[in-house]
Amino acid sequence: MSNKPKPGTPAYYDKKWSPLTEGIKGRDSVYTAWVMENEAKHLSSSRNDEERISGVTLRFVFPSLRRAVPELIDGELNFKRVYQCLEDALYSCYLETFVDSDYNYRIPEYIPSSMDTTKLTLGLAERTKAAIESLRNIL
């Protein structure tokens, strides 16, 4: 019998997304991978050019999910809390683009407008909340 997780299961996505969830343990890793998979599906099926997978998406969205999801697993899952947590994580990711590995400050290639950031965070918060709730129903 194979030891591989069945496709479409939380364990399957945990293994699939393990390069991006490295260092996150247990159910935090499972939830983070589940949310990343749902976000990747949304982005790849999006008809809106602004939401398609791009360098910006990969640079900010997935690292933000990595930071935020483990904090959201426990406790009340209301939209305001999810939005705030993701907004904080996105802001931290944006700030990191201003400092290189030698701690020299530089202007990044892309600085999102406040409108872009708000739109991104609103959609991401809705999808993240729904993904966490759906996994809570499975586990």
Image (cartoon, rainbow, N blue to C red):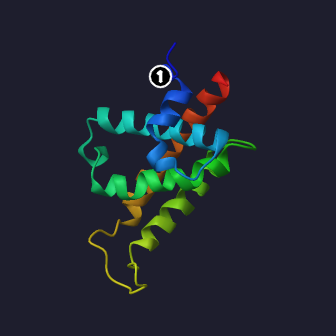
Q: Nearer the viewer, residue 27 or 70?
A: 27
Quadrant in which residue 135 is drawn: top right
Task: Identify which amino acid the numbered label 1 is placed on.
Answer: Gly
Pick out the residue farthest to the top.
1
Numbered-mark total: 1
Image coords of residue 8 (percent x, y): 47, 22
- At x 60% / y 35%, what residue is drawn? 132
Image coords of residue 77 (percent x, y): 68, 41
- At x 49% / y 66%, what residue is drawn? 91
- At x 52% / y 22%, what residue is drawn? 3
| Element assignment for label 1 | loop
Q: Is residue 127 above or below residue 69?
A: above
Q: Is residue 72 above or below residue 2?
A: below
Image coords of residue 29 (percent x, y): 59, 43
* Circle 1 residue: 8
Q: Nearer the viewer, residue 80 or 42?
A: 42
Q: Is residue 66 visible?
A: yes
Judge from the rendering whether residue 72 lies leftward or rightward of residue 54; answer left or right: right
Pick out the residue farthest to the bottom.
104
Judge from the rendering whether residue 120 lies leftward or rightward of residue 9; answer left or right: left
Mark 1: give few (<14), some (14-19) or many (20+) Cα within 10 Å.
Answer: few
Q: Is residue 123 visible?
A: no
- At x 43% / y 85%, what residue is drawn? 103
Pick out the residue farthest to the front.
1
Q: Is residue 42 above or below residue 101?
A: above
